[in-house]
Image (tube, rainbow, N blue to C red):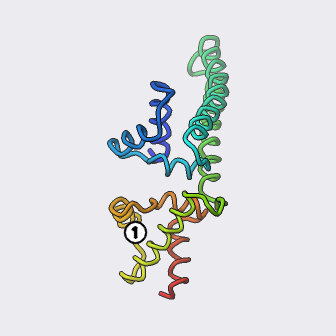
Amino acid sequence: MNLYQKTIKELKNQLNKNPRLKREEWDIYAKQYKLLSSIVIYAHEDVEHWEDLKNKIKKIDKKLEKEIEKIRKKLNRSIVINGINSKQTHQINDEINELINLYYEVVKENNRKRAKNYPVNSKLYEWYKYSYKKLKEETKKTGKFPTVNEWTILAKKYEYNSYQVIEYISGLTWNEIREKILKEINI
């Protein structure tokens, strides 16, 4: 499972257990279980405050839950009336699968392909620019662009943005970032 999806799923679980969960508590929990920190989730969800993040996650979750619940009930009725192997039951099952797949495709596309615009004084954007600068410096120093694993090690060690945050804020894939940086430093 994608680390982002795993993180959001666990954050939802923790919020269900404790709706008053604080950002600091989440960051400690996330570090312990190797999940994404609040600042990374902020970038993915395009929010700047913990309460906004919690509200956004609840809204997305509720909308999806309602739609899936509606189709699930329809599926259960079809199983009772027509049996599990009926054509109608299989069609409804396909509806659920399409809905879930479409939802994750849209979320993934929204998160990856759109560069984010942040206010000039945004701490998140400043941290991104700093991390991007360090990524360029590392590439220049070693003569090669770091792999995702190499950058992850450096990012954890020096508290830079993860490659996911850099991808998300820039709206570029890691390979596109690589090409851009290599052109910028003429390697």
Q: Classify 10 Å Cα crowding around label 1: few (below 14), some (14-19), many (20 and above).
A: few
179 shown above or below 63: below
Q: Examine the rendered structure and indicate whether residue 44 appears above or below residue 172.
A: above
Residue in the picture at 51% in, 88% down = 186
Amino acid type indicated by mark 1:
Thr
Q: Relative to residue 149, is residue 116 drawn left or right?
A: right
Q: Report x, y in % for residue 51.
A: 58, 37
At 61% across and 61% down in the image, what residue appears?
121
Using the rendered view, name the quadrant where residue 157 is placed: bottom left
**Residue 49 picture quarter:** top right
Point out residue 10 in the picture as x, y percentages from the top left corner. Answer: 44, 35
Residue in the foreground of this view, choosing between 142 and 156: 156
- Report x, y in % for residue 158: 36, 63
Instruction: Report which residue position mark 1 lands on.
Output: 147
Residue 114 visible (yes or no): no
Residue 7 vertical placement versus 83 (above, below): below
Q: Residue placed at 64% from the left, 52% from the top?
A: 110
Which one is in front, 121 or 160?
121
Task: Please state the total of marks drawn on the protein image.
Answer: 1
Q: Is residue 136 left or right of residue 34?
A: right
Helix, strand or loop for disc 1: loop
